């Protein structure tokens, strides 16, 4: 069975580049807490110390979910008031691209859990059903069609999926462990924040889900 699944996935395997960094959440339902990390998800490499200091705590959703936030050497721990999916939103100041002259505001959404089927933030990925592998990509309560979705598995492979005309997409999770789902949407609406004008807003989501019933695996050293 393992040989069959690995053969099936071989054509879609792409190892992430050495310079790829992500911010992601790890949700622990037993402790009612979530931990935010920065590093190479595919290699399970977590940055710490000075490299991690610039990562912000962000704003958490749903509101009133987080009781306490604690910064540690290699993570930020959010203590939750109850079992729930969680989203941390980090918004950066508008920046102008020297080559294009376009000023962009960037909003990052870091999410974990797949029990809530309701939209939590303006840009969101929600499961169609609790613990489902079929999701909907949403922006301002509308499905985002024909958008690329990248998924990184616990073994390190990356596969790209595409949303349909309703914003729905289905992923495959053959192995046990954490999967990182990545999505992006560009809103061309101009705006201004704190006196700084921008030409567009780029919304980026990293969404972590857990698979407890897949194939076991290990990295050979």
Image: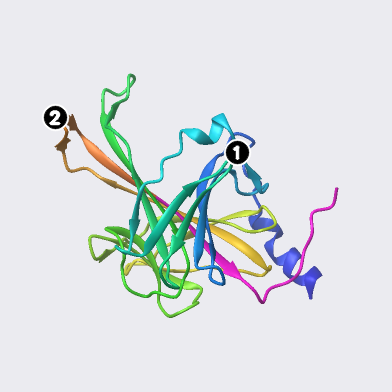
The residue at 26%/22% (across/down) is 101
* Front in this rendered view, residue 63 or 90: 63
* Front in this rendered view, residue 121 or 127: 121
Q: In this view, does 11 lie to the left or right of 194?
A: right
Mark 2 and mark 1 residues within 8 Å of each other at the beta carbon: no
Quarter of the N terminus within the rendering: bottom right
Q: Name the residue under label 2.
A: 195
Q: Is residue 183 left or right of residue 120?
A: right
Residue 49, by quadrant, is: top right
* Whether residue 91 is situated above or below residue 31 in the rendered picture: above
Give the percent coordinates (x, y) of residue 206: 46, 53
The residue at 43%/65% (across/down) is 80
The residue at 79%/71% (across/down) is 2
Classify mark 2: helix, strand or loop. loop
Instruction: Find out whether residue 206 is within the magenta segment.
Output: yes
Give the percent coordinates (x, y) of residue 8: 70, 66
Classify mark 1: helix, strand or loop. loop
The residue at 32%/67% (across/down) is 165
Q: Residue furthest right?
A: 221
Q: Name the residue under label 1.
A: 47
Q: How far apart are marks 2 and 1 (CA)?
A: 34 Å
* Whether residue 114 is situated above or below residue 187 in the rendered picture: below
Give the percent coordinates (x, y) of residue 145: 33, 61
Give the percent coordinates (x, y) of residue 173: 61, 69
Which numbered marker is on residue 219? none
Instruction: Find out whether residue 133 is within the magenta segment.
Output: no
Q: What stretch is highlighted in magenta?
A: 205-221
């Amino acid at each position: 069975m393992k040989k069959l699944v690995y053969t099936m996935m071989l054509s879609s395997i792409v190892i992430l580049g050495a310079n790829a960094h992500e911010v992601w959440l790890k949700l622990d339902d037993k402790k009612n807490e979530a931990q935010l990390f920065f590093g190479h998800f595919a290699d399970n490499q977590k940055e710490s110390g000075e490299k991690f200091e610039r990562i912000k705590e962000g704003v958490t959703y749903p509101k009133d979910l987080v009781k306490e936030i604690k910064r540690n050497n290699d993570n930020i721990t959010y203590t939750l008031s109850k079992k729930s999916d969680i989203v941390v939103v980090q918004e950066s100041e508008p920046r102008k691209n020297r080559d294009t002259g376009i000023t962009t505001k960037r909003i990052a959404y870091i999410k974990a859990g797949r029990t809530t089927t309701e939209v939590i933030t303006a840009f969101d990925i929600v499961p169609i059903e609790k613990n489902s592998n079929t999701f909907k990509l949403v922006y301002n309560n509308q499905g985002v069609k024909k958008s690329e979705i990248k998924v990184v598995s616990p073994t390190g492979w990356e596969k790209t999926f595409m949303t349909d005309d309703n914003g729905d997409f289905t992923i495959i999770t053959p192995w046990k462990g954490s999967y990182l789902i990545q999505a992006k949407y560009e809103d061309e609406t101009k705006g201004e924040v704190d006196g700084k004008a921008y030409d567009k807003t780029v919304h980026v989501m990293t969404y972590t889900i857990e698979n407890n019933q897949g194939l076991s695996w290990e990295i050979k050293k």
